[in-house]
Image (spheres, grey):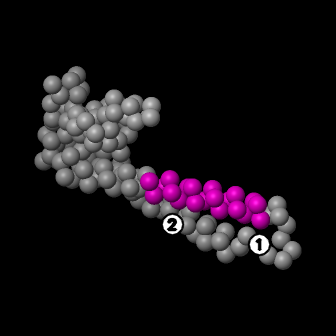
């Protein structure tokens, strides 16, 4: 049976065969998540400025070459996609920080089993164990 490890005054689960979390490891995960939040906030601000510029250019106008209009539309779609991806990653990092602070970090949101220390070190925003993630991807 997996056992939780105590760290940061919260229980963080580990799988059988994994070493318990150390305070340094938990601090590093939290620092990584905080860094991700700051990085995504900057990326969103930068992309939104780029979007403003593209929207200011407009899509049509007297004498505008249709290829230029198409290129501007393509760039705008790309920027909107980048903004959405950054927002998704920001939400994931903020959710992981909330879960860490609430003592829910490391538990799968679907089955309630431990996600696994190795998986969380590699992907600190993970909310699903490998089995549930694989099931989700097969759908």
- Neighbourhood count class around disc 1 (C-alpha, 10 Å): few under 14, some 14–19, many 20 upward: few
Whichever of callouts 2 and 1 sits on the residue coming sooner in the sequence is 2
Residue labelled with disc 2: 45
Is residue 118 highlighted in magenta?
Answer: no
Q: How far is mark 2 from mark 1, CA to CA?
A: 26 Å
Q: Quadrant of the N terminus?
A: top left
Where does residue 124 sit, x and y in percent of width and height? 34, 43
Q: Please say if 63 is above or below 28.
A: below
Residue labelled with disc 1: 60
Is residue 75 highlighted in magenta?
Answer: yes
Q: Please say if 71 is above or below 109.
A: below
Where does residue 111 sit, x and y in percent of width and height? 25, 36
- Neighbourhood count class around disc 2 (C-alpha, 10 Å): few under 14, some 14–19, many 20 upward: few
| Left or right of 69, for residue 81 | left
Where does residue 80 sit, x and y in percent of width and height? 58, 60
Q: Using the image as rendered, state which of residue 76 and residue 18 is in the foreground.
A: 76
Q: Residue at x 28, y 39 (%)?
A: 110
Q: Which residues are magenta?
A: 69-88
Q: Quadrant of the C terminus?
A: top left
């Amino acid at each position: 049976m997996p056992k939780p490890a105590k760290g940061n005054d919260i229980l963080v689960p580990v799988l059988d065969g994994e070493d318990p979390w150390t305070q340094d490891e938990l601090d590093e995960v939290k620092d990584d998540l905080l860094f991700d939040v700051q990085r995504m906030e900057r990326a969103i601000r930068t992309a939104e400025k780029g979007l403003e510029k593209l929207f200011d250019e407009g899509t049509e106008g007297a004498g505008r070459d249709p290829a230029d209009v198409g290129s501007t539309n393509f760039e705008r779609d790309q920027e909107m996609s980048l903004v959405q991806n950054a927002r998704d990653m920001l939400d994931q990092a903020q959710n992981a920080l909330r879960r860490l602070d609430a003592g829910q970090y490391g538990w799968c949101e679907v089955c309630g089993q431990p996600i696994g220390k190795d998986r969380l070190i590699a992907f600190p925003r993970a909310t699903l164990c490998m089995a549930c993630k694989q099931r989700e991807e097969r759908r």
